[in-house]
Image (cartoon, grey):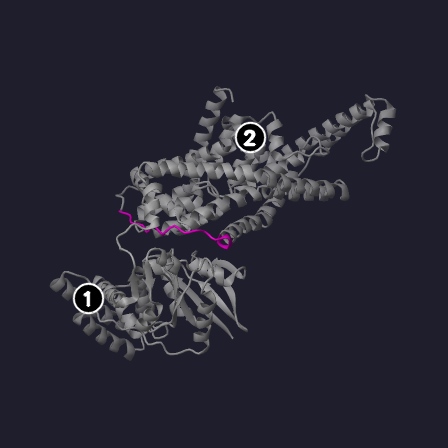
Amino acid sequence: MQATIALAGNPNSGKTTLFNALTGARQHVGNYPGVTVERKEGLCSVGAHTAHIVDLPGTYSLTAYSEEEKVAREYLAQERPDVVIDTLDASNLERHLYLVVQLLEMGLPLVLALNMVDVAKSRGMEVDAEKLSELLRTPVVPTIARTGKGKQDLIQIAADLAQQPVNQTPLVISYGADIDKALLQMQSMISEGAFLKSYYNPRWVAIKYLEMDEDVIVKGHEANPDLSDRLTAVSARVAAHLEATLNMDPETMIADHRWGFIRSIIQQGVITRSNDSDRLYLSDKIDMVLTNRFAGPIIMLAILYGLYQIVFTYSAAPVEWVEGLFSWLSDTVSAILPPGMLQSLVVSGIIDGVGGVMGFVPLIMFMFLGIAIMEDTGYLARVAYMLDRVFKAFGLHGSSVMAYVVSGGIAGGCAVPGVMAARTLRSPKERLATLLTAPFMNCGAKLPVFALLIAAFFPANEALMMFGITLLAWMGALVAAKILRMTIIRGESTPFVMELPPYRMPTFRGLATHTWERTWQYIKKAGTVILGISILLWVIMTFPGLPENKAAEFEAMRGQVSAAYPEAAALELENAGEGAELSEQAQALSGALAAVDSQEAQAALRNSVAGRIGGALESVTQWAGFDWRTNIALVGGFAAKEVVVSALSTAYSLGETDPEEYQTLSQTLAKDSSWSPAVALALIVFTMFYAPCFVTVVCIAREAGSWKWAAFSVIFNTTAAFILAVGVYQMATLLGY
């Protein structure tokens, strides 16, 4: 038997850490059907059996205000897991019990993971798990998810409950005479009509009608319009009565009574405090410094700069090793395969194209590790808190900060989840402004481009350059948001309150899991999407090739070059084996013929489909210093920003001057006369701000509800990026860079 166990819980309750501890590497990530909320699933062994664990989105309640809440509720109601494990933060028990009450009202088979009991103890709190279990009539297991303590007991109890299911009686709370009376009437109507019977229990459905839950009402109207209207009429009558007598609506009344129920549980000796409850906890003391109005931002910038310094310093050697590996692979394949189309495809199209992106895996991994440390310790939430006031000044909401951070506010994120994170904003205008500007952040796909250009032209100031690029991205996004909010998305800002989780010591396993998950996604993308695009780019960079008359001209040039040297030198070169020592004249002839070969390769590349497209754009992009090769790379970058690097790798590989002497792409660009620090700066700025990748554009269209905004994002971003790139290039050129 394989039991299905759903993991529920508030955000920052340690739910995902518990999921990782239970499932280890036996997990996979996808999306819920029809929505883009992340769905994590994994397997866990329990004795001779296996449990299927589903990690639900973190939610504070089971209302339908956000997509996460709606997804969690729909899964619990429709998928009917055998058991639900709700993860509670023992140090903030009262607040976390609100979700517990709602799960119990649904009548779900429930086990409570009383997590972070060590944190509660350090705060002078002892939670009586047995007492809590007795009062709620559901198993409660103390756990410490980050160390794995209690996880075996927890999963065993959940598995036992799944194998010997009992009919869980839904929790019934009194909501006052008026609501209780209405609930009885509505329950009777729902039971008689078998209304939404396959989804929820009658009392729960009635409560949702009183709370005016739009999602349930829509479902009810589709199932039985007449009964749904009668239930709505009862709800309206109760609402009018409460408004007239208590100046209150049913939803507030229900929430008040739930909190009253929770208070009554807490006051029955569930929590014992050994210290004064008003004393400052360690997290509060740390926050007095780290989130201080004046010192906080300075510390935040110092941490960011320190992160980049560490990443570039310690990733340099592994990056060289990986580049060396691809160099060896390229040489080996060149030696095995005879010159021709197949060798060109494998070496220039695949190895050099994908290798240009894969070479940055160590750097990306170090960056993800730094982000995981900031995330797992709780510092990332403080960053959002400190930036809230800044965001308000630019017409954005405090919740927009997390969307920016997820998109790559600290270089290495991804714009797709960042855009989706904007759905937590309730104001449509703030939400739209956020999802249009979040792609300005430096996602992980842009990192290889920046790393490449920094290594080529600013090797002495790598961390400082990356720090400046990050600040520029934030500045650009905020200014763009302000412009949008002052023009086409005008409206007032809404207030923001966020929860600051306690600081925690990250575990090695947690950091390793988070770092590997993100790095693996990058590697997988390079091995699939980027590989496919690299092959496509090789095709359009190779065909149609040179016309016969042009090829004949180069052949004639080779004949003229050979004729200019003694016949003995030509014979020596023709008969020389690999690695043979050549005479001075044979070496000179070899160099002259290689120069002709290089000119022919350049001419063929320029005559290819990609070369013609790049050349056609040159008349415009020259103002930003971009040549036709860069144009090809930037057009390819619309599919995925990593393609900018792989396209440049392929383009320079196809037209390289000396195939015997391997150079990294950074070294090649640094020596190319058409490149300069001014061109590199302009390309960095353009890559930072131009059209989001295709997947992000689709995501914007879906989140904004219109392709009009997706098209606006492409045009607005690209126009702004080009103007800025031209300005940077012209200014840098004037200054002599």
Residue situated in front as seen by the camera: 207 or 730: 207
Q: Which of these two is toward me, 421 or 686?
A: 421
To which residue does mark 2 refer? 459
Q: At which x and y percent is residue 291? A: 33, 42
Q: Helix, strand or loop at disc 1?
A: helix
Name the amino acid, label 2. Answer: Pro
Corner quadrant of residue 576: top right
Q: Could you say where residue 550 lies in the image, as x and y percent from the top left?
A: 71, 30
Mark 1 in CB contact with mark 2 (< 8 angstroms): no
Q: Quarter of the image holding residue 401?
A: top left
Q: CA distance from mark 1 to mark 2?
A: 69 Å
Of label 1 and label 2, which has the lower sequence position? 1
Which residue corresponds to the image point at 81% horizontal and 21% vertical from the top-left? 564
Q: Is residue 20 above or below residue 409?
A: below
Q: Is residue 216 above or below residue 430?
A: below
Residue at label 1?
Answer: 236
Q: Give residue 486's position: percent from left, percent from top.
A: 29, 37
The x, y position of residue 453, in whole percent, is 55, 33
Quadrant position of residue 83: bottom left
Question: Overall secondary structure of the magenta stretch?
Answer: loop
| Residue 116 visible in the snapshot | no
29 left or right of 568 in image: left
- Assess disc 1: are there few (<14), some (14-19) or many (≥20) residues with their C-alpha within 10 Å of its C-alpha: some
* SS type, badge 2: helix
- Region in magenta: 495-510
